[in-house]
Image (spheres, rainbow, N blue to C red):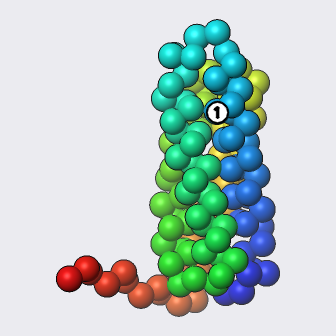
Amino acid sequence: MTQQQYQTCIEACNDCAAACDHCAASCLQEQDVASLAHCIASDIDCAQVCRVCVGLMQRGSKLASVLCEACSDICDACADECEQHAHEHCKDCAIACRRCASECRSMAGMAQSQVRPAAIPPRH
């Protein structure tokens, strides 16, 4: 697959990373930050994984589909966490995470049906 074929997934990952960054920063401004600690951590993890996926897709890495499959699970977990909170930034983040999870799942499925990526060789 080429970068052009990945474009919707790249956009969803970029949007998700931005929404997660905004959510984490906004959570830090809320009154009871301690109750949002898991949300903030989930946001940070999700944003990082999304950015790595973007880089892999932009380079056409054979590992993109493998990481995007994992990214879909991470995005769903972040959405699950954000949906537990009433803040608007959490709701917006959950929506972006669900869209990203869907796009990553779709991309991973398409890529794997075309060519199964080589396994990561074990370290010696």
Q: Quadrant of residue 5?
A: bottom right
Q: Is residue 16 above or below residue 109?
A: above
Q: Where residue 37 sits in the image (x, y, percent)?
A: 50, 25
**Residue at 66% of width from left, 67% of height from top?**
54
Q: Where residue 43 sits in the image (x, y, percent)?
A: 59, 39
**Residue at 68% of width from left, 41% of height from top?**
21
On the question of residue 121 being in view, the answer is yes
* On-image quarter of the N terminus: bottom right
Q: Amino acid at mark 1?
A: Ala
Say what secondary structure mark 1 lies in.
Answer: helix
Q: Where residue 56 sits in the image (x, y, percent)?
A: 60, 74
Q: Quadrant of residue 86?
A: top right
User: 103 or 48, which lies in front?
Assistant: 48
On the question of residue 91 being in view, the answer is no
Horizontal side of residue 123 vs 39, given as left or right: left
Q: Where residue 53 sits in the image (x, y, percent)?
A: 60, 66
- All told, the count of numbered labels is 1
Q: Is residue 5 above or below residue 43?
A: below
**Residue at 67% of width from left, 62% of height from top?**
103
* On-image quarter of the C terminus: bottom left
Q: Give the residue pinned by disc 1.
A: 24
User: 78 or 37, which lies in front?
Assistant: 37
Horizontal side of residue 41 vs 19, given as left or right: left
User: 22 or 102, which lies in front?
Assistant: 22
**Residue at 58% of width from left, 89% of height from top?**
114
